[in-house]
Each structure stands twice: as C-alpha cells, then as structure tokens.
Image (cartoon, rainbow, N blue to C red):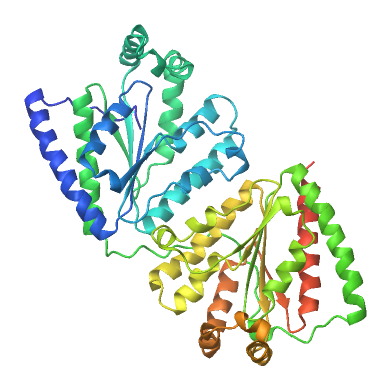
Amino acid sequence: MIKETAMPGAPDKETIRAELDAAREKLEDFQIKVKEAKLPVIVIIEGWGAAGKGSVLGKIIRNIDPRFFRVVNMDKPTEEDRREPFLYRYFVQIPEAGKFRFFDTCYMEEVTEGVLGGEYDEKTYRSRIRSINTCERQLCDNGYLILKFFFQIGKKEQKKRLEELLADKNTAWRVDKDDLWENRHYDECLSVYDRYLEDTNSPAAPWYIIDATDRKWAELQTLNYLNQGIETALRNSDVAAPIRQNPFRLLPAPKLSDIPLDKTIPEAEYKPELDRLQKRLRELHYELYRKKIPVIIGYEGWDAAGKGGNIKRIAGALDPRGYVVEPIASPEPHEKARHFLWRFFTRLPKTGHITIFDRTWYGRVMVERLEGFCSENDWQRAYNEINEFEYELHNWGAVIIKFWVQIDKQTQLARFTERQNTPEKQWKITDEDWRNREKWDLYEGAVNEMLQKTSTEFAPWHILESNDKKYARIKALKIVIKELEKACASVK
C-alpha cells in the first residue's frame, strides 16, 4: 500500500499557506457541526519515527475547542495491560458523541512490533487483524467517523531527521532505540507496515498516506482529509448501517413456552449439595487465578425470577479478592453517548478474575428494543455485534457463561404480590416491574429471538428453571463448575 502509493508533488509555499488558512477555518466551523450532530470522531495517526506526527497533530488541534477533544498517546502495553483483552485499552478510549479523540499511534504499533520482534506468529497476527477490522466496522456502523493517517518519509529523510534531533541536546530525548532500529531495518519495517495497512484498509475506515517530507504540506493533506471525512459523515448521518450476516455457528435454542418448569430439588438434598458444590467452586477459583483464566458470568431473566439469590450462591463460594458483581441499570449519560458495548468493556475482569453481570449487554435486544430506547436498525445489528464481542472475549481466553432465569407468569405474580405485602421486601418491587409484566408476551418474543440468534458454540445460553429457586441455584453451580473444570483442564 505504501509502496504502491505515488506521492504527489507538494504545491508551492504560497499555495500551501493560502490553502492551510482555509482548511483551518473549515475545521473550526466543522467542530460546531460535529458537536450539534453528536458525531463521534476518531483520528488515528501512525507513521515512521521522526515523520512529524506529533508536530502536525499539535497544529491541527489548535483549530478545535479543547473541551471537544482529547489526545491519547498509546504507550507499549504493560504487564497489567496484557491481563486485559487486546482491544481493551483502545476501546475504553473511544470518544463520546460530538467529540474528537486523537490517537498518537494506536494498535498498529503494538501489532507491527509484535511481528517484527517475533512475538506474533501468523495465527496471532491474523487474529489481531480480525479484531481491529471488526471493532472499526462496528464503530462505523454505530455512527463513528474513523480517519486513519500514515505519515510516510523515505529512509534517507528519516536518517537525516534522526541525526538532527540527536545533535541537539534539547531534542535528543525524542529519539529512542526503536527509532534507530527502525531506520536500520527500514525495508523490513516497510514490508510489515505495508501489509498491515493493506490488511486494515476498508471502505468505512480507509488509510490515508500522508507525504510527510514537508511539514506544512503534511498538515494541509491531513486537514483536507479530515474536513472531507467530517463533511461526508455529516451528510450521511441519517443513513442506516446494513444488517450483516451472522458468521458464527448457532446452537439450537428452545422457546420459553416449551421449557418445563416442574423441576425441583428435595429440601433435604439442597443444603448438602449446595455445600459440596460451593466447596468445589472455591477450589476452582484458586486454580483459575493461578492459570490466569478470566471468567464472565451473565444473568438475564424475568423480574422476580431469582437472579439475585442465584448470584449470591455463586459469589458466596468465591474469594472476595478475585471477583466482582456488576449490577447493570440504565446507562449513565456518558455511557449512552458511546457505543452500547463500551460500558461492558470497561467492566471486564482481568485474567484470573471473575465478573458476574446482573443483567448484561442483552438489554439492547430486550428492554431497549421494546421500550424504544434505540432504533430498529440498532437492535437488529446488535445480535451480530454481541456475537462478535463474545467471540473476541473467547479468543482472549475467557470462559463465558450466560444464564436465562425462567419462571412462568403465575409464579412471577405470586412473588410480586409477596414482595408488595412484605415490608422488608417492598424495595424489590417497583411500578416499572408491574408495567413490564403487562408486556410479558412482547418480552417473551424478544427473548426467544435473542436465544436463537446469540447461542453460539463459544458462548451458549443455559436455561435455569427457577419456579423452584433452589433447583435453579444448584443447576447454575453445576454448570459453572463444569465450564470452569473444562477451562482449567485445557491450560497447564
């Protein structure tokens, strides 16, 4: 891609100066329209060492109100970073609607250094490319504008700039050993960079190669592409994203109406079995920590189905230092202003830890769908986006366990009534619970569709028959133990 790009000659200095003034003014005007249209803008700047990336970035952001942007410099991943999914430290940085986020290097550096340093084999490289392309496509489908720039200079020009920087004690600190290595191995790096750019180039998030031999010319090219991208995005803001095919194999899922709810456990068996299973789960938790296996347990189900009590029995067996329960309510304003999965990405466990979600990202295709909190295009796309999200977590090495806690309508009514008539339980029942009950049939249809479209081999749904809460607790413990034993056995 770099090799095949013919660099056009720069205009004369007078032309560049005049066009720069116009381009800067245009960006100043666009920042207001970006805010008004609630357009989130991601700008990724990559390129050779000493190509002038920081200098150009510094000039561009002068044209934007500092309240509307943030610059992120992604350092090399730390050991702590490596305990998170590959995309975690990048995805958590995405901007709110109406704001800019500038990345002074992004995931390209991590991937290409992994290849050049021999840390990545071909399989790992392809996995990273798939993750990046999927993430960028999802962001674009959800209304983000992504602009990616690669600053190109030749080997001789880079060497000259590095020598000039090193000759001045006030700028020598800007040159590190990686820059010098890159120049000595320019052709090898060029080949790896070129492949990466080609593999991550897409119509929705294309790469723009910037001729960086002249800094003002580089600034003008970047501003022009930035302005063009914003103008196009504003014009297309009402265009719905396509509903994409699901690429994953789906498992058969029962309809809720076909699930028998007469399963029970004798009272005399419950306590001994609970103690036995909790003891085994406690042992597994220590093994998970030692083997650095992350675990994600998600609960969905009817109001009053017994999710809280079920979670309590799982959590009661775990070391409190190694797990967290995340109760998911309506999104806060800063969460609602980002991709709907952002608030879940920020709550993922580190390796060796467990996160239990009391309600999950599936709210997108249930409550948000039925209450009109998102568009039909949003929730229709979400099935595939959720499957891709869970596949990313699976590839990271996470165990994903998803429970739907099922009861019948009569049992729910009895539990609602008990809560309402028992003073110490009244906090558990709200007017919203009663309103949702009136929409039982609509919710049942949405849940059936959710189960059918998101029960994958790597993240299947498990149904907990919870007319008898104790039976559901024992079943959940057995499923968790089985999945964790399988994961532990696969890691030496």
Q: Is residue 380 visible in the rendered structure shown here? A: yes
Where is residue 50 shown, x and y percent of the image? 34, 20
180 lies above or below 290: above
From what the image shows, is residue 130 above or below residue 247?
Answer: above
Q: At x 62% / y 80%, what residue is drawn?
A: 428
Measured as percent of width and height from the top left, residue 334 is found at 41, 58
Task: Answer left or right for 257 relative to 60.
Answer: right
Could you say where residue 107 lies in the image, as x and y percent from the top left?
46, 38
**Residue in the picture at 34% in, 27% down:** 3
Residue 210: quadrant of the picture = top left
| Location of residue 35 (image quadrant) | bottom left
Q: Position of residue 467 (x, y in %)?
A: 74, 84
Residue sitting nearer the eye, 35 or 491: 35
Residue that sits furthest to the front in the current view? 423
Tell me: 99 left or right of 124.
left
Location of residue 413 by image quarter? bottom right
Q: Is residue 14 above or below residue 207?
A: above
Residue farthest along the top direction in this orientation: 167
The N terminus - image quarter: top left
Q: Do we see residue 231 in this rendering?
A: no
In this rendering, position of residue 228 left or right of residue 441 = left
Q: How many discs appear? A: 0
Taking depth in this image into account, of 294 and 412 the one nearest to the observer is: 412
- Quarter of the image for the C terminus: give it: top right
